[in-house]
Amino acid sequence: MSEPKACILSVSGVTLTDEERKLLAHANPWGIILMGRSCVGIEQVTALTDEIRQASGRETLVFIDQEGGRVKRLKPPVWPDFPAPLTYLPIYKADPELGREAAWLHHRLMAAELEPMGIRADCAPVVDLLHPRMHKIVGDRALGETADQVGDLAQAALAGLAAGGVAGVIKHMPGHGRAEVDSHERLPVVRASREAVEQDIAPFKLVKHATMGMTAHLAYAALDDETTPATHSRKIIREVIREEIGFDGLLMTDDLGMKALGGTLASRASRSLEAGCDVVLHCSGLDVWGKILRDAGQVLREMSEVAEVCPQLSGGQLRRAKAADAATGHLKPFDKAEGRARLEKLLYGSPGSSTPAA
């Protein structure tokens, strides 16, 4: 069988259409990401991930955006609720050991929901610094205000996911916290000095061992220019993400459908790959009016356009993709009920003195 294409695509609903089955069989995207429109029940999601693998003819890696707080595709009452990541910062400030334990439990419990349904990759944790006066696109999705806080808690988050058989994706390199506008709507331009931007780069250095990472659709005047987002900047990807940060994991784009990127979907994908991204990600989550996209025909057209311009994985891309695949499925024993009770105690009760889970 030929190698998969350098893309992560999405699907339109709770089950595959005939056309989507054909696309998966023909295009063979490396991964699939599920949006909220595809997640209504545990048995349904499990059946859908099985369908995806049957259609592609291989163990296609299935992704989701499940951070907790504002960003969650799996929602109550079907699935447990989880607070925003920033919730753990006060615990960490009071006692770093308990803060790490809480972040670990949060992500281990999420993995306990994801992995049994066949979802083995989560686009989390957010490693962007919180800058309170900037746009709330990051806001309470951040883990902290300093590199040490974020790096420490992000390592716990990645470890929690991994213990549940799920690979995490650090985002958004080289730092989204200074965005003054929403990158879903237009291109944010960071005009801060190189010294200031280095503060945003710093937490990513502490989790550079992550198997996967995601780019930011932001332009950085101090790193390249004011018109080229990091996703399309060979200079930022090569000199900052790969060299300065030292990240050697699989590098994916943020969603190609976001308005921060100009041009057609095909040109956005091509420019991303030419700049040095390993794979492109397209969710087809929102239409031009910002409403949730549910039209199966439009989703299929967008996915087909992206897949058409993506080459098969090869060289370093393929090596990193195989490493990401191999990082999943390594579950460690875990009592979900005990874990949930312990997390709730850390969040809402008087924390005990037990050591962090490992």
Image: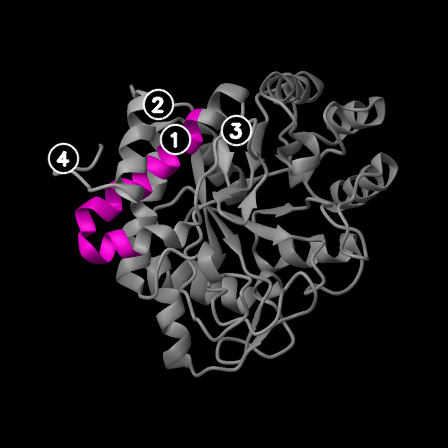
Q: Quadrant of residue 137?
A: bottom right
Which amino acid lies under the numbered mark 2 shown in the image of this protein? Lys
From which residue to which does the magenta span run? Answer: 90-112
Which amino acid lies under the numbered mark 3 shown in the image of this protein? Trp
Q: Is label 1 in a helix, a strand or a loop?
A: helix
Between 71 and 170, the residue placed more toward the observer is 71
**Residue drawn at the location 53% of the way across and 69% of the way down:** 235
> Does label 2 or label 1 sit earlier along the sequence?
1
Vertical arrangement, residue 213 with respect to residue 6, above or below: below
> Does label 4 or label 1 sit earlier along the sequence?
1
Q: Is label 4 in a helix, a strand or a loop?
A: loop
- Residue 1 x/y as whole percent: 65, 21
- Residue 28 x/y as whole percent: 69, 29
Q: Are marks 3 and 4 in contact (CB under 8 Å)?
A: no
Q: Are marks 2 and 1 in contact (CB under 8 Å)?
A: yes
> Does label 2 or label 3 sit earlier along the sequence?
3
Residue 354: which disc? 4
Left or right: 100 with respect to 85?
A: left
Cα gap from disc 2 to disc 3, whole angstroms = 13 Å
Q: Is label 3 in a helix, a strand or a loop?
A: loop
Density class for disc 3 (Cα within 10 Å; few <14, some 14-19, many ≥20) is some
**Residue drawn at the location 49% of the way across and 47% of the way down:** 69
Secondary structure character of the magenta stretch overall: helix
- Which residue is identified by label 2? 336
Residue 109: which disc? 1
Q: Are marks 4 and 2 in contact (CB under 8 Å)?
A: no
